[in-house]
Amino acid sequence: MGSSFGNLFRITTFGESHGGGVGVVLEGCPPRLQIDIEEIQKELNRRRPGQSEITTPRQESDQVEILSGVIDNTTLGTPLAMLVRNKDQRPLDYGEMKNIFRPSHADGTYQVKYGIQASSGGGRASARETIGRVAAGAVAKQLLKKVQNTEVLAWVKRIHNIEADIDFKSVRLSDVESNIVRCPDELSAKLMIQRIQDIRREGDSCGGVVECIVRNPPASLGMPVFDKLEADLAKALMSLPATKGFEIGSGFQGTFLKGSEHNDAFLPSENGRLKTATNNSGGIQGGISNGEPIVLRVGFKPTATISKDQKTVDSDGNETILSAKGRHDPCVLPRAIPMVEAMVAIVLADHLLRNHGQCKLF
């Protein structure tokens, strides 16, 4: 329970951080979709550990294996299963932490809920679980590109208290990938990298904000009331490890405006599509996409596992001191970029199929 997401375009992830492997079963992907396996691998490469000096040094190639659902790079419409085998797992790194709860990690709550936990690397609570999401998201991206020429692009907006001023209308993938922190502003990126390195040397960690834009999204996606598009986006993104906040469009800053300042005035239609003078709504009104760019932001907390001494308790409730070992990201944001893009793409693909099923018959 709790490992599946989506309605028609539905993913189920499996595997633990230090088990044999991790992956995903994707159901509902339309048949006869030509998919580029190399694009799936590229997305996994953006997510993989060991890619720079500001990420975990764990070395994994994260090579994807497609087990079912595809023939000659064409989807069959049957479940599409993808697997990545763990190669560089080191469960002994977690031997001393086996019975000690890491502060702000899932160890304690998993133990309370299940009475047992995968102590090595956090098990299902590890960001390694997101491999399956990123693989499925790469398929969703290709579907959206084919149907609507939709682009989903995310970048690091803020690290700790260093915030970049990004023109989201002009930023491109090459700008995001131009540096290891994945911030398209060169000056801010240098400061962010230095901050992460400094905090890492202290044995500590930091968080920040990821911003994401969906360009040329299909209009009419989303359902009234409980399945509003922004509600499903919020659930999808808040299900990612280490997320602590979500906002769309003007977000919390919009609460400082009056209605006359915040409202997005409609303009004369172009090709029968809605057009607005501003986009404080973030591309979604009444829970339904209006065709304007979808703009959202996600807050990530500092990585919970740090090497600084911390007060905690063991599984018997005894007070102790934890000096965590293992290989951990001092900041999750650079590797979170493909995760955010993947979950946004999966939500859009799911609502695209749902909208087609309900509204395109007549």
Image (cartoon, rainbow, N blue to C red):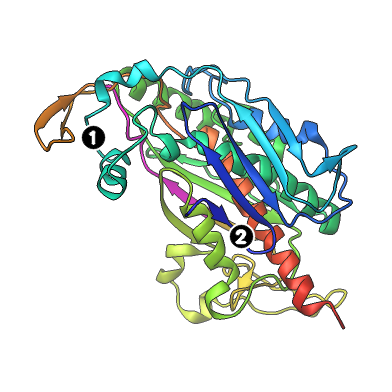
198 relative position to 346: left or right:
left
Look at the picture and state if 262 lies above or below 95: below
From the image, tell me which residue sits under label 1: 101
Quadrant for the C terminus, please. Answer: bottom right
- Report the front residue among 180 and 243: 243
- 164 to the left or right of 84: left
In the image as oriented, which residue stretches furthest toward the bottom? 362
Please indicate, yes or no, whether residue 22 appears anywhere in the rendered image.
yes
> What amino acid is found at the position of numbered circle 1 in the picture?
Phe
Q: Nearer the viewer, residue 193 or 59?
A: 59
**Mark drawn on residue 6:** 2
Q: Disc 2 versus disc 1: distance between alpha carbons?
A: 32 Å
Q: Which residue corresponds to the image point at 62% horizontal and 42% vertical from the top-left?
A: 24
Tell me which segment is drawn in magenta.
297-307
249 is higher (above) or lower (below) than 316: below
Instruction: Name the magenta segment's main secondary structure.
Output: loop
Query: Which circle's residue, 2 or 1, is located before the other in the chain?
Result: 2
Q: Name the residue located 55 percent from the left edge and 56 percent from the top edge.
A: 296
Q: Quadrant of residue 304?
A: top left
**Which residue shows up at 76% across the image and 59% down it?**
216
Q: Is residue 203 left or right of residue 10?
A: left
Residue 305 on the magenta segment = yes
Give yes or no for residue 7 being in the magenta stretch.
Answer: no
Q: Secondary structure at mark 2?
A: loop
- Where residue 97 appears, as percent x and y from the top left, is 26, 25
